[in-house]
Each structure stands twice: as structure tokens, then as C-alpha cells.
């Protein structure tokens, strides 16, 4: 079964090619069938491979399939090879599983589009690239997927390419991502420089021997990798592209900008967990960037009026949690949250898509309200997912978020935990603000808009996702040890040989004349006190309920309250304008670059360089003009110069 | 003999066309196309018969030409020139397709293209300094004519600028060639211009090496063109007709980088290592500067021209990494740039033929009326950005990897080029292809026709082929690059009188290199005393 691996990315690629070339000819129905069929096939294959993988003993659960030599130059050789291990398996299941549902939803959502085929060709291509990203067995193949998904995201954000805002958003997404990719590339080059290979297995096996714990090299490599991750996963400082990316069709936001692509950065960090574990300084940065982003995006999310933008900031915030988890070394928790987030956020985005679809492309929640009765199914699934993201027991988000918060306290520090728990409060608040404003209260719908529930093809995927969002927490039930399925599953990928690290790092540091104090790394970490764990659980449920009650008071009970609170507050204005980060980037980076370039062109290129060249030409021209006068053709002039020359000659000789 | 035949076949074709009646345009076109395609197919024979294991010249022919001066007619191909040679015949055929609809003096146009083809092929096969120089100058003439006759409004200014710039460089090269000729004769007593003999036997002292390096450097750097010798390029491109631009970008610029690999590296290894930081930084400045200036261009062709400055900066950087990754990357990037930039110029030509303008602000919303054109344009644009899976990435990554081994900071600055490339290409693409149309004239444009497909699709195929499976291309470089690297390796270029460390292995790591360098400097000082 494992030998089927190569089929997983191949199905969507074939689907994309069929729809891209013959999409107009085969008609909308067939386009939909091809697109969904290819992804579902790929999901089925993934499940088969999963069984194959389960069949292996835990420590041997890694399978590599080499397709062909890709780039070979001297001793640098990269193969096009797939690697399936517990981590990539989890990602493949999420991608193909959630991907299938979103593809099916899209059939209904995109029904009226003329270039239906174009949409599905891109979407399938995205699936291909995303699968390459998680299945590649080396950093460069991951980079194909990494840039490939960015490129498909560019196509899909700019799907409505005659809209200025869509084009700007697409270009912005690509360029901001490229900043991250630049860092990724440097990291890959650095890794090759140090390790002489870019194959995961070889690099990670060599890491304890070649890197010094907390050494500069480890910090630089992981630092660049993390900067790359912030681009793709929309973290501070590169998060600004994601809210704008909402210009794309809503299922795209669900698939690319919530469930899969934006979590690629988390995958990258978890994949390189050993490198990050050897760079505690980077880990600290990861944790603080994650926590900071979670908090910052949550505050912005409270002030937005566009249903998709609220969800976009929520995504940024939730990915922040995942990085917070990574940063304190709770990689399992990060992946756990990645999975549950994929369920509930995909459901939320698709739910918002269902609303937007039924409201004839109205996205402003001020023009909604009371939609509960028009969208019964959508409302129900939306509510379940909102409860999940808010962290209400026993829905999935509760377990995964709680695990991150627990680890941020016991493995991190009180600040990190504080950021996390505050973020959780805000999350519950802004998510229920969204629910109350959209589905509850008085209707503020335009009289000429007639809301209607979406067809089954759209609501069924919603129900499946809502179910998953509800029960997904089963993957990681805390307290009862041995029941944490995900933890046991990921164990082999996350195993770190501290003994070797400490021995080698100590030796290498001593060679450089430093004294190493690394023995503390060897202490076995004790499992947290059950009492603390339970206390934290109650606390976070309490916090979530506080947020929900707050939202209830503000938007149902006393609808005038928010306005009176925020009116004329400069703080509110700043948050509402997203802390002016876009404007600041514009003024400090974009404009100077463009104006500087103009200056370079008009002044340096045209005047200085070309001026010099033309100047030289003119001087030569002037000289020859002077010289030309000697060639006047008058004999008397020639005679004169002969006499002068002869006289000078005489003077010189005598 | 066969190599000579393939090289001169286009010239024979041009002579043949001269006798055809001017009225019968289709006969002229078909003859020219037939010659070009035959030449391309024949040149593939070299690929299939190429011996991958040896760095030596293959398909060689050497005959005495001017006995008194020791000038030989000497041609041959190795891993460095093979693909450039094939690309030249390939692009010639594509260019002939691209000028199919030209009305003005079509007979002369076809003849000029074919003569140009022989000139360029000659440059890549010539293994005699005199012969190289003759071809180097020869291809200037048809190019000058192509810009000067079929070019745009300021074509005279552009063609003269092009000619003078290049002629200035080649003049310096001529001086350097004569110097080497004399030096070789002094050292061995044999008067010869044979490049292989000179490369193998001459032992140039370090002082003159520097001067010779500079002379050759200027000639080639103008051709590449490296910053700050690039200002002829935008003018030439803007005024040149589409075919001229394609040849200019696709082949002529490659002569510069080829020159570095054929002359500077093997002949002046000491000077190469000495000047490496300067050349490297010039290349990096070129990468960033070209990208910046490209971003704000208003004319599509100028934009592509400045992007060439940026891309060729990458190639130069790879060459001066002096290691496997860098030089192989540079060689494949040479080909990639030839494909992608040629395709970009062809695409600009397609839209220029329809709208008779290249101003970005005149366009917008072209995707709506020309969807197939849009797809191909997008693919080519992304390849030019260096999207992984397409050709540009393979070259760029290897180059950056190579230079990283030599100077990580330089690599870091050069890598910013990938960000800026995305900026200028995507911004341009958005304004031309997306959004709403700025002019009613755009509404009735026709999508690609068969001829345009015929010239664009082969390039698109190559874009993906090299991007996904570059092995058939890159394997041709291996042996020659290994040989070349051993030549520039500081441990191997000591004067012949000293003990030779042949094949001591190339470490490829900075610390080793600098070690050798310092060791070497000491020695050269003691030599001077």
C-alpha cells in the first residue's frame, strides 16, 4: 500500500491538467466531477497508505519513494522523492480530507461563475502543490510546494482579476510571501553549507553531531526558517497579506487561507523540530511571535465588520497559538491545534460562504442580523464551530487550545500563558460577536435581498466539518495517559536524542574554549500535575464563557453599548485601522522603494551612467571636430603647419 | 568537418537566398525556415554524439589558415559551448518564424538573420583567438543592420550606440589578444593564435594577468552586460525589432558569459581570484539595480531589458563562485535566460503587432480578450521570477548555493533579487493583463494564431522540462566544469616552474580557499623580489 504514495499528489495534478486544458469543452458538471473525483481519489489513497503505515512498527514508520533525480551538480544532488511518516501522514489526511469537502462545497458555491473550470484547475493545482509541500523528502522539494501553493494562492486571490482590489491583494500576497521565501532559501543554503545535504533524514540525523546547542549556526538556520514560516503562515511581521487575501472566492479562503496553506509554516517548524530544539533563542522568538500574533490579531478581529475579515484575523490569531505551542516545544499540541483548526475554521469559512451566497454577495455583518431562521443548517454548523474555536468543553478546540495553554505555562512562562489566555478571552468575544450580529437579533438585511439557505451540496460538507469540529478532540484526550492518540502517533518524529546533543555540544564548546552547562537538558520532564491541568481547564472554560457573555451583553442585551464605549476613542480607531501597519509598510518600504527606483532610473541610469558614456562620445566628437580643422584642404594651411612643425623640430633637436 | 558545415550552413543559406527572386516572398521565407530548422536538427547530432566523460574539445577540426602568423582554423565543442550552440540554432529558427509577417525587405531580413546565425555559431566554436575575434566582430554587422533597418524610431541612435559600445570592448580584447600572442611566442618560441595551445602552454605572470583580465573583462562585461556597462542594452532592445531582441537577449548576451568561461577563467586564474570580490559585487549590484530600475519602466521592452541586466547578474555571480554549483548554475541559467527572456520578447512582440504600442499604461484587461496568450504569458512570467518547478529556479538556486560557499553575505544580498523579481514582473503583469481595459482598442484583439503558437510553445515546453527534469541538459556540463574548476582553484594555478598540485581536489569551502589565497600571495611577493 505504501507504494501508492506517488499517486496522492498525481491525482489532483491530472485533474488540474484535464480541467485546465479541456474545462470549457467538457462542461461544468464534468469539471466538478473531475476536480472532486481526483481529490477524493487522493484521499482514499491516503487512507490506504495510512493503513500501510499503521502496519509498520512505530519506530520504522517512515517510507521514502524516490521518483527521479531532480537537480544534480557536483556533489549537490536533490531527488524528487516523497517521504511518508506520521507527521506528513497527518498533514496529508487533513489536506485531502478537508480538501475534498471544500471541493464539493465549491461545486455549489461557484455554480454561476463563467470560468468555473479555471477555478477548479487552480484548486486542483493547489492540492498538488500542497501535497508536494508536505510529502517532499527534502527541503528543496518542500520549496517547490511552498512556492507552488503561494502561486496558486496568487491565482485564486486574483480570481476576479478585473477587480483592482483583488489584483492588489494577489500581488501583495505573492510579494510578501516572497520575503518569507527569501529567508527560506537562505536557510536551505545554510543547511547545505553545514550538513552537505538537504535531505530531511540525513540533516536531522546529523544535527546533534554538527550543531552546537544554542550555537550561532543553529540560531541562524532556525531563525531564517522561522522567518520563512512567518511569511506563509501570516505571522508578525508578515501577516498583512492574509486579511487582504479574502478577495478570493470564499471556499478558497477556507481551503488555502485557513485549513492548509497557512499552516505550512507550522508544519515546517514541527518538521525541523530537532533544529529548533537546539536553538532555544529561536524557540523563544517563535513563542513570543506566536503569542503576540494571537493577541494582536484577536484585537483587530473584534473591530472588523466584514464577515470574512473577522475570520481572517481569527485565522492569523489561531495560527499564532500553533506557533506559541511550537515555541514552548509542545509540537504535538501545535499539530493538534492545526488539525482541529482545519475542521472548525474550514467550517466557519464555508458557513460564511453559505451566508454570502444566500445573501447575494453581501459580506458586511452590519447588514445582516437575524439570519438564523433563513439559514437553519448553516447557523447550526456555524454555532458548533464557533463554540469549538471559543474553547467550550467538550468540543475539539477546547482540547487543543488547552494543551497549548498548559504547555505555555509549564514549559514557557507566565507572560506567554497570559498572552494566550487573553487571546482566548478575545476569541470567544469576537467570534460570538460575529454569531450574534449575523444570526441573532433584529434583521438589518436590505429589503431587496432575499436570504435563502444553500443547497445540499453546500450544507452537507458543512455538517461533516461541524461533526469533526465537535469530536476532533478525541485525538488528544488529556489526563488519561496513553489515550493521547496523536501524541503516540507523532512520537517517532518528535524524538530527540538529548544525550548525543549534550555530549557533542559540550565537546564542541570546550574545543572553542567555552564552558558548557547543558546537563539540565537531560532531566526528564515530569508530566504536569493533574490538579494544575484541571484547574487550567476550568479557568479557560470560564474565560471562554466570560467572552461569550460579554458578547451577549454587548450585541444582544444592550446593542447600544459598543457604540457608547468606542465612540471617539482613539485607541479603538487605531485597532479598527489594523494598527496602521499596512500604512506604515507602505510609507516606509513600498513608497521609498518605488520612488528610489524612479530616481535610480532617471538620475543614475539616464544621467550618471549614460551621461558619462555620451559625454565621452561628445568629447571625442569635439576633439575630432577640432582636429578636422587641420584637414581644411587649403595648401597654405598645410604649408604653415609644416613650417611650424619644422621649427619645433629644429628647436628640439638643437 | 561536420561541425564546420553546420556552422556555415546558415551562411550558405543566406547566399542561396540572395539568388532567389525578391517577389517570391513565400519561397524566401520557406527556404530560410528550412535552412534554420535543418541547421537546428543537425546541431542536435552533436548532443547525441557528445562524450560526457571528457572535458576535451569534441568534433574538432584544425587546419592552417594563415601560416605566417600561425593562425589556424580551429573549431570544436565542449560542455561549455554545446548547449549554447544548440540554443543558437534553435532560436534562429524561432526568430525566422517570428518575422514571418514582416513586410519590409523580407529577403534582406532573412539573409541578415542567417548570416547572424553563422556569426554567433562561429563565436561558440572558434578555438583560435584570431578566428574568435573575426566572428566576434562579424556578428556585429548583421545585428547592427537588423536594429538599424527594421528597428523603431530611434533606431540609428540605438544601433550606433550598440556598435560603438561593443566595438570599444572588442578593441581592448584585440590588444589583449596580441599581447598574449607575443607572450606565448616569447615563452615557447612558437607564434600561434591557437587558443588550446596557448591555454595549455602559456604561463602568464601575475602582473600582466591582471591587465589582460581587465581587457577581456571589459569586452565581455559590456556584452553581458554587467552594471554599469549596461546602458546600451535598453536602447538597443527598445529600438530593435522583435527578432533582434530575441537574438540579442537569447544569444548575444551569452557570448559575454561564454567569454568569461572560455578565456578569463582558464587563462587568468590568479587574476580571477583576485578580482572575484569586485566582479561578484558588481554582479550583485546589477541584480538588485536591474530589478529596481525594471520595476518603474513604462515601456514593456525596457522592463524586460532591465530584467535581463538583473538576470545576467545572476549568471556572472555563478561564474565567479568558481565551484560546481555556481558554474553549472550559471551555464543552465544562460540557457534559461535565453528561453524565458526570448519568450518574453516574443510575447511583447505579439501584442505590439496588434496594438503598435508597448506602453504599459495603454493596456489592461488583456486576459479577457486573449486568454490563451494570458496563460502563456503567465507561465513565462513565473519562469522569469524563478518559480520552482520551472527553469529559472534551477539556475538561480544553484548559483546562489554556489556563491553562498564563497561568500554568504554576498549570497544573502543577491537572494533579495528573488523578491524584487516578483515585484517588477507581477506588477507589470497586473497592469497589462488584469484589471479593466484602459483603451477601447484592447477590446478587439485577437488571440494567438497558429504561427505564434509555433514559436511560443517550444519555449514553454522547455521551461517545464528544464524546471522539472534538468538532467539531460545539466549532464553535458559536468566534465568541462570539473576541468574548469581545477584551473581556477588557487592551489592549481601556480606558475608551472613550481610543483604542480594537479587534482588535489576542490574543497569548495571558503576557509580552504582563503588559506590558499594567502599562501599564494606570499609566494607571489617572494617571486617579485
Image (cartoon, coloured by chain):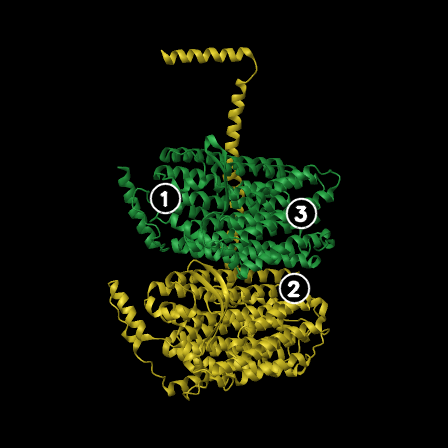
Chain colours: A yellow, B green
* Mark 2 neighbour density, 10 Å: few (under 14) some (14–19) many (20 or more): some
Quote the CA–CA distance across marks 3 and 2. Answer: 45 Å
Compared to residue B197, the image places residue A59 above or below, namely below
Give residue B270's mark. Answer: 1
Callout 3–callout 1 Cβ contact below 8 Å:
no
* Residue that carries the numbered disc 3 in the rendered image: B34
- The tag earlier along the polypeptide, 3 or 1, is 3
Quote the CA–CA distance across marks 3 and 1. Answer: 47 Å
Residues at discs 3 and 2 both on one chain: no
Badge 2 marks a residue whose secondary structure is: loop
Look at discs 3 and 1 and give the one toward the viewer.
3
User: Is A269 on the left or on the right of B382, as rendered?
Assistant: left
Q: Nearer the viewer, residue A562 or B360?
A: B360
User: Is B413 on the left or on the right of B354, as rendered?
Assistant: left
| Quadrant in which residue B184 is drawn | top left
Q: Position of residue A630 (x, y in %)?
A: 52, 18
Compared to residue A274, the image places residue A474 above or below, namely below
Amino acid at each position: 500500500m505504501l507504494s501508492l504514495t506517488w499517486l496522492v499528489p498525481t491525482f489532483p495534478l491530472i485533474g488540474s491538467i484535464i480541467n485546465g486544458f479541456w474545462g470549457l469543452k467538457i462542461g461544468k458538471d464534468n469539471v466538478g466531477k473531475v476536480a472532486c473525483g481526483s481529490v477524493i481519489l487522493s484521499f482514499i489513497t491516503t487512507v490506504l497508505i495510512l493503513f500501510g503505515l499503521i502496519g509498520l512498527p512505530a519506530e520504522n514508520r517512515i517510507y521514502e519513494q524516490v521518483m527521479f533525480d531532480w537537480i544534480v551538480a557536483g556533489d549537490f544532488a536533490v531527488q524528487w522523492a516523497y517521504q511518508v511518516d506520521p507527521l506528513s501522514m497527518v498533514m496529508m489526511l487533513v489536506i485531502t480530507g478537508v480538501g475534498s469537502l471544500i471541493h464539493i462545497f465549491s461545486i455549489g458555491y461557484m455554480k454561476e461563475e463563467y470560468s468555473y473550470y479555471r477555478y477548479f484547475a487552480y484548486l486542483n493545482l493547489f492540492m498538488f502543490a500542497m501535497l508536494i509541500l508536505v510529502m517532499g523528502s527534502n527541503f528543496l522539494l518542500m520549496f517547490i510546494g511552498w512556492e507552488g501553493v503561494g502561486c496558486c494562492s496568487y491565482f485564486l486571490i486574483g480570481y476576479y482579476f478585473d477587480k483592482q482590489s483583488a489584483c492588489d491583494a494577489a500581488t501583495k500576497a505573492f510579494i510578501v510571501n516572497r520575503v518569507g521565501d527569501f529567508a527560506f532559501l537562505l536557510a536551505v543554503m545554510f543547511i547545505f553549507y553545514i550538513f552537505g545535504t538537504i535531505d530531511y533524514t540525513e540533516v536531522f540525523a546529523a544535527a546533534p553531531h554538527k550543531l552546537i546547542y544554542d550555537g550561532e549556526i543553529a540560531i541562524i538556520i532556525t531563525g531564517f526558517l522561522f522567518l520563512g514560516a512567518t511569511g506563509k503562515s501570516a505571522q508578525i511581521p508578515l501577516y498583512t497579506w492574509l486579511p487582504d487575501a479574502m478577495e478570493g472566492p470564499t471556499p478558497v479562503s477556507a481551503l488555502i487561507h485557513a485549513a492548509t496553506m497557512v499552516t505550512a509554516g507550522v508544519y515546517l517548524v514541527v518538521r525541523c523540530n530537532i533544529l529548533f530544539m537546539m536553538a532555544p533563542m529561536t524557540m523563544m522568538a517563535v513563542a513570543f511571535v506566536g503569542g503576540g500574533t494571537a493577541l494582536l490579531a484577536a484585537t483587530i478581529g473584534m473591530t472588523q465588520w466584514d464577515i470574512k475579515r473577522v475570520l481572517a484575523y481569527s485565522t492569523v490569531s489561531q495560527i499564532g497559538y500553533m506557533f506559541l505551542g511550537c515555541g514552548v516545544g509542545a509540537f504535538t499540541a501545535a499539530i493538534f491545534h492545526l488539525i482541529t483548526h482545519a475542521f472548525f475554521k474550514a467550517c466557519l469559512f464555508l458557513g460564511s460562504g453559505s451566508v454570502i451566497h444566500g445573501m447575494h454577495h453581501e459580506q458586511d455583518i452590519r447588514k445582516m442580523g437575524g439570519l438564523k431562521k433563513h439559514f437553519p443548517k448553516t447557523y447550526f454548523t456555524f454555532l458548533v464551530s464557533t463554540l469549538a474555536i471559543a474553547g467550550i468543553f467538550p468540543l475539539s478546540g477546547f482540547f487543543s487550545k488547552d494543551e497549548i495553554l498548559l504547555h505555555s505555562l509549564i514549559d514557557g512562562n507566565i507572560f506567554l500563558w497570559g498572552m494566550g489566555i487573553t487571546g482566548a478571552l478575545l476569541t470567544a468575544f469576537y467570534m460570538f460577536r460575529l454569531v450574534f450580529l449575523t444570526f441573532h437579533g433584529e434583521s438589518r438585511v436590505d429589503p431587496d435581498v432575499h436570504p435563502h439557505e444553500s443547497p445540499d451540496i453546500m450544507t452537507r460538507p458543512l455538517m461533516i466539518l461541524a461533526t469533526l469540529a465537535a469530536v476532533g478532540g478525541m485525538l488528544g484526550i488529556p489526563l488519561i495517559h496513553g489515550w493521547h492518540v496523536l501524541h503516540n502517533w507523532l512520537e517517532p518524529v518528535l524524538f530527540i536524542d538529548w544525550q548525543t546533543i549534550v555530549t557533542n555540544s559540550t565537546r564542541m564548546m570546550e574545543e572553542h574554549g567555552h564552558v558548557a552547562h547543558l546537563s539540565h537538558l537531560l532531566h526528564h520532564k515530569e508530566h504536569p500535575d493533574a490538579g494544575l491541568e484541571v484547574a487550567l481547564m476550568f479557568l479557560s472554560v470560564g474565560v471562554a464563557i466570560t467572552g461569550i457573555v460579554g458578547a451577549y451583553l454587548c450585541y444582544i442585551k444592550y446593542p447600544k453599548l459598543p457604540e457608547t464605549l468606542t465612540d471617539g476613542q482613539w485607541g479603538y480607531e487605531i485597532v479598527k485601522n489594523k494598527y496602521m501597519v499596512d500604512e506604515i509598510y507602505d510609507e516606509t518600504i513600498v513608497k521609498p522603494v518605488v520612488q528610489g527606483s524612479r530616481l535610480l532610473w532617471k538620475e543614475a541610469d539616464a544621467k550618471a551612467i549614460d551621461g558619462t558614456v555620451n559625454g565621452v562620445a561628445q568629447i571625442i566628437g569635439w576633439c575630432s571636430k577640432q582636429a578636422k580643422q587641420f584637414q581644411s584642404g587649403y595648401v597654405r594651411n598645410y604649408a604653415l603647419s609644416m613650417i611650424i612643425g619644422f621649427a619645433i623640430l629644429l628647436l628640439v633637436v638643437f | 568537418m561536420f561541425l564546420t558545415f553546420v556552422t556555415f550552413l546558415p551562411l550558405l543559406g543566406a547566399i542561396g537566398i540572395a539568388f532567389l527572386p525578391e517577389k517570391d516572398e513565400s519561397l524566401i521565407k520557406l527556404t530560410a525556415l528550412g535552412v534554420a530548422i535543418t541547421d537546428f536538427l543537425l546541431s542536435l547530432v552533436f548532443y547525441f554524439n557528445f562524450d560526457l566523460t571528457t572535458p576535451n574539445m569534441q568534433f574538432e577540426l584544425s587546419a592552417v589558415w594563415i601560416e605566417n602568423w600561425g593562425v589556424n582554423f580551429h573549431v570544436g565543442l565542449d560542455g561549455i559551448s554545446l548547449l549554447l550552440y544548440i540554443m543558437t540554432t534553435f532560436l534562429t529558427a524561432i526568430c525566422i518564424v517570428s518575422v514571418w509577417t514582416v513586410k519590409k525587405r523580407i529577403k534582406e531580413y532573412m539573409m541578415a538573420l542567417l548570416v547572424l546565425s553563422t556569426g554567433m555559431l562561429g563565436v561558440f566554436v572558434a578555438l583560435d583567438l584570431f578566428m574568435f575575434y573575426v566572428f566576434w566582430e562579424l556578428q556585429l554587422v548583421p545585428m547592427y543592420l537588423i536594429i538599424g533597418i527594421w528597428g523603431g524610431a530611434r533606431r540609428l541612435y540605438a544601433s550606433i550606440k550598440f556598435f560603438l559600445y561593443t566595438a570599444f570592448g572588442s578593441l581592448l580584447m584585440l590588444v589583449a589578444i596580441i599581447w598574449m600572442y607575443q607572450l606565448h611566442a616569447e615563452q615557447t618560441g612558437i607564434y600561434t593564435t591557437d587558443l588550446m595551445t596557448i591555454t595549455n602552454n602559456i604561463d602568464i605572470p601575475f602582473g600582466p594577468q591582471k591587465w589582460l583580465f581587465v581587457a577581456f573583462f571589459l569586452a565581455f562585461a559590456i556584452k553581458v552586460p554587467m552594471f554599469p556597462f549596461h546602458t546600451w542594452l535598453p536602447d538597443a532592445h527598445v529600438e530593435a525589432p522583435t527578432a533582434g531582441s530575441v537574438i540579442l537577449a537569447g544569444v548575444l548576451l551569452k557570448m559575454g558569459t561564454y567569454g568569461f568561461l572560455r578565456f578569463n577563467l582558464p587563462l587568468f586564474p590568479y587574476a580571477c581570484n583576485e578580482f572575484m570580490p569586485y566582479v561578484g559585487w558588481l554582479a550583485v549590484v546589477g541584480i538588485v539595480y536591474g530589478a529596481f530600475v525594471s520595476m518603474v519602466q513604462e515601456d514593456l521592452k525596457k522592463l524586460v531589458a532591465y530584467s535581463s541586466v538583473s538576470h545576467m547578474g545572476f549568471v556572472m555571480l555563478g561564474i565567479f563562485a568558481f565551484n560546481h554549483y555556481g558554474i553549472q548554475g550559471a551555464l543552465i541559467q544562460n540557457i534559461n535566460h535565453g528561453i524565458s527572456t526570448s519568450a518574453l520578447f516574443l510575447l511583447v512582440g505579439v501584442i505590439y503587432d496588434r496594438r503598435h504600442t508597448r506602453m504599459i499604461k495603454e493596456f489592461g484587461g488583456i486576459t479577457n480578450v486573449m486568454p490563451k496568450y494570458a496563460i502563456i504569458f503567465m507561465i513565462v512570467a513565473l519562469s522569469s521570477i524563478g518559480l520552482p518547478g520551472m527553469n529559472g529556479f534551477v539556475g538561480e538556486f544553484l548559483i546562489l548555493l554556489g556563491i553562498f560557499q564563497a561568500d554568504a553575505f554576498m549570497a544573502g544580498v543577491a537572494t533579495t533579487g528573488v523578491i524584487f523579481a516578483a515585484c517588477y514582473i507581477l506588477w507589470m503583469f497586473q497592469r497589462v493583463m488584469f484589471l479593466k481595459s484602459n483603451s477601447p482598442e484592447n477590446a478587439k484583439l485577437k488571440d494567438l494564431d497558429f504561427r505564434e503558437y509555433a514559436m511560443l510553445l517550444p519555449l514553454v515546453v522547455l521551461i517545464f522540462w528544464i524546471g522539472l527534469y534538468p538532467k539531460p541538459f545539466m549532464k553535458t556540463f559536468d566534465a568541462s566544469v570539473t576541468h574548469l574548476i581545477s584551473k581556477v582553484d588557487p592551489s592549481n594555478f601556480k606558475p608551472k616552474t613550481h610543483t604542480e598540485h594537479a587534482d588535489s581536489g576542490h574543497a569548495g569551502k571558503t576557509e580552504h580557499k582563503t588559506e590558499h589565497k594567502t599562501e599564494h600571495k606570499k609566494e607571489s611577493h617572494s617571486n617579485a623580489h
